[in-house]
Amino acid sequence: MFLKKLFFNFLGFVLLPSLLWGQTVDVEVGDSFFAPKDLTIQKGTTVRWTNLGFLVHTSTADAGTWNSGALSTNDSFQFTFNQPGSYRYYCVFHGGPGGFGMAGTVTVEDPLANAPSFGWTGLTLLFCALAGAGIWFLSKREPLT
Ligand SMILES: [Cu+2]
């Protein structure tokens, strides 16, 4: 049953982190507010704005990076942030650029930018440690055959 273990190891160490990496975060579009108003996410995250109000709204970036167009009740719009930075946005009907009225911000962090630089030696050691920990963990569950 070594293949089975390999499969679960793959699930745990490869698939799960990749799911977290490309996750989607919801922002409620209300009458007339965004909730949360200020959002901080990691690079690669998709933000989904859904209009839960009765009025028509938009999610429009100050810098023109994205524009949802008019969103009616229950309409949604999503955008994936691959560039770290700070983004202001607003609703064209109830707000304006510069944080005026119905507006919000998305702050996109790069998780690797603040990480210490390991170099190849460090990465190799880290990989060996993780692989070793994985093998040890699995060997505790069922004897290796
Ligand atoms: Cu609006």
Image (cartoon, helix red, strand yellow):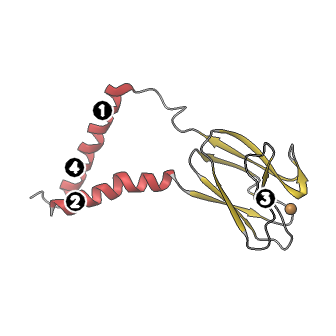
Distance in Å between CA atoms under marks 4 and 1: 16 Å
Where residue 11 appears, as percent x and y from the top left, is: 34, 58
According to the picture, the residue beneath numbered tag 3 turns out to be 34
- Image position of 48 with respect to 13: above or below: below
Using the numbered discs, state the Cα–Cα distance from disc 3 to disc 1 in whole angstroms.
Answer: 44 Å
Q: Residue at x 73, y 70 (%)?
A: 75
Q: Position of residue 120 (x, y in %)?
A: 34, 27
Looking at the rendered structure, the kind of residue marked 3 is: Phe
Q: CA distance from mark 4 to mark 2?
A: 9 Å
Q: Which mark is residue 124?
A: 1
The answer as to whether callout 2 falls within 8 Å of ligand 1 is no
Q: As drawn, which residue projects farthest toward the left? A: 145
The CA span between labels 4 and 3 is 46 Å
Q: Tell me the crowding category of disc 2: few under 14, some 14 to 19, or many 20 or more residues within 10 angstroms, Cα based.
A: some
Q: Residue type at mark 2?
A: Lys
Q: Quadrant location of ligand 1?
A: bottom right
Q: CA distance from mark 2 to mark 3?
A: 45 Å
Q: Nearer the viewer, mark 4 or mark 2?
A: 2
In-front residue for pair 131/108: 108
The residue that mark 2 highlights is 5
Circles 2 and 3 in contact, beta carbons < 8 Å: no
**With 68 as the anchor, is 117 left or right in this view?**
left
At numbered mark 1, what does the secondary structure look like: helix, strand or loop?
helix
Q: What's the residue at 79%, 61% (across, down)?
A: 69
Label 4 CA crowd tier, 10 Å (few <14, some 14–19, many 20+): some
